[in-house]
Amino acid sequence: MFGFLKLAIRNVWRNRRRSIITMLAIGMGLMLVIFLRGLFSGMDKQTIDGFIKFQSSHFQIHAKGYSEKARLLPLDISIENPQKIMDELVDIPEIDGIAPRIRFGGLVSSGINSFGILGIGIQPSAEEKVSVLLQKISEGSKLNDKDGYALIGKELAEDLNLKVGSMLIVVANTIYGAMNAIELEVKGIIDSGFPQYDASAVLMTIKDAQRLLDMENRITDLVISIKETRMTDTVLSSIQEKLANYAARLRAEVEIQSWKEMGERAWGTARLRRNFFIIINMVVILVAVMGVINTMLMSVTERTREIGTMMAVGTTQREVLALFLLEGLVLGIMGGLLGSLLGGLLVQYFATFGISLKGTSATGLQSTVGEAIYAQFSWIEIVISFIVAQIIAVLSASYPAYIASKQEPVEALRHI
């Protein structure tokens, strides 16, 4: 077999130009597949991580019926005595953190201008375990449990000409529909990289939010993070069991949503990307297959008399078949190595430096992945892609190899 391999390598290089073009077709196609796989995998991971860390965490618990009206930020559909639910869930080992929140709509004023806001009341010590928002302070410092302070999005701060230490007034309707206001000092500026936060978010302690909204001992969201995202379905079952016991005992109905439900729109985009990737794969595979088949068929045609001579001196049909399959494999290996090297380098580069979205019109993409797209490098993906390329190369060579092996020695020797 080693002798056949040496012969296959020599045969491949007999027509260097044609072989190099075929190898380049395989290599460039594989490079494109590896690069796009790494880029789309990175985008999917950023989409999921961004949604979990900045918006939903892994789970959110609401009062029954809240999710249907969540976009309206209703205050009347709220959870009373949230600590009782937290006590129910505390012994689930996979849970990493539980934090109460109040989300509401309102207005913020600096004395001259006013803007609509997304107000978020948080418990700072608990919030750090379920979100990274408090780690995105570009100026000033984090909130603590001391009342009277707020964090404000960077763009909103610029629009209102607010700085650390400035005073702002938050106006909102209470749970009973009355208008109320609270004055807070800006303690920090949030630069999250997510436009929907930076342009509208105002964070305050949950006690300040409850006082503003007249919601003593009530919240709108109970946010839960877990140690491993892959454990989502398992933990969801455990939480649902606990909540069923809670509802039966206290007669207070609640509902739970996982990040998969809350991010349906984002996952639809991810599925669209995967379908696009499949189409590109099919096109690349077709180009590679046609290249290998064309090269091998031309080689069979040019070497018909040679094949006849080999068979006349005792080479079997099986050995001729193996020889041409090996030639297809050699083309696949050379092109695969080139494509794997270039694709791997491209993915590693963009995994390190990313593709900046700053200054572009891709605001929708920025809202899900942040200010830059980073590819995801994976040796396993590269190895799998390389192996698949070899399988495709050998399968593509199988028809020309079959044609070569079926030559009749006498007819082949007469071929001109």
Image (tube, rainbow, N blue to C red):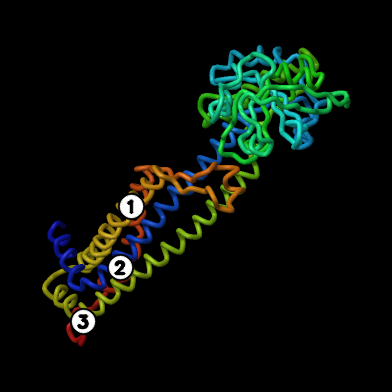
Q: Residue at x 69, y 27 (%)?
A: 120
Q: From the viewer's perspective, is the residue at label 3 or at label 2 nearer?
A: 2
Tag 1 and tag 3, C-beta contact below 8 Å:
no
Give the numbered dot on residue 22: 2
Residue 217, quarter of picture: top right
The residue lying toward the viewer, choosing from 241 and 119, is 119
Q: Position of residue 190 (x, y in %)?
A: 59, 31
Q: Which residue occupies 41% across, 62% down?
A: 285
The quadrant the N terminus occupies is: bottom left
Q: Is residue 311 left or right of residue 259?
A: left
Disc 2 crowd, CA 10 A, few/some/many (<14, 14-19, 20+): many
Q: Which residue is mark 3?
A: 412
Q: CA distance from mark 1 to mark 2?
A: 16 Å
Q: How far across and how far down the image is residue 349, in percent?
A: 37, 47
Going from the N terminus, do you reach mark 3 or mark 2 first? 2
Earlier-in-chain disc, 1 versus 3: 1
- Work out whether mark 1 precedes mark 2 in sequence or the reverse, and give the earlier one: 2
Q: Is residue 91 left or right of residue 11?
A: right
Q: Work out whether 197 lies above or below 224.
A: below
**Secondary structure state at the residue bearing disc 3:** helix
Q: Quadrant of residue 109?
A: top right
Side (left or right) of 48 relative to 176:
left
Q: Is residue 19 left or right of residue 103?
A: left
- Could you give the CA–CA distance between mark 1 and mark 3, rounded to whole angstroms? 36 Å
Amino acid beneath label 2: Thr
Residue 378: x, y in percent? 38, 42
* Residue 386: assigned label: 1
- Type of the residue with mark 1: Phe
Tell me the element at label 2: helix
Distance from disc 3 to disc 2, alpha carbons, whole Å, reads 26 Å
Count of numbered badges drawn on the protein: 3
Q: Secondary structure at mark 1?
A: helix
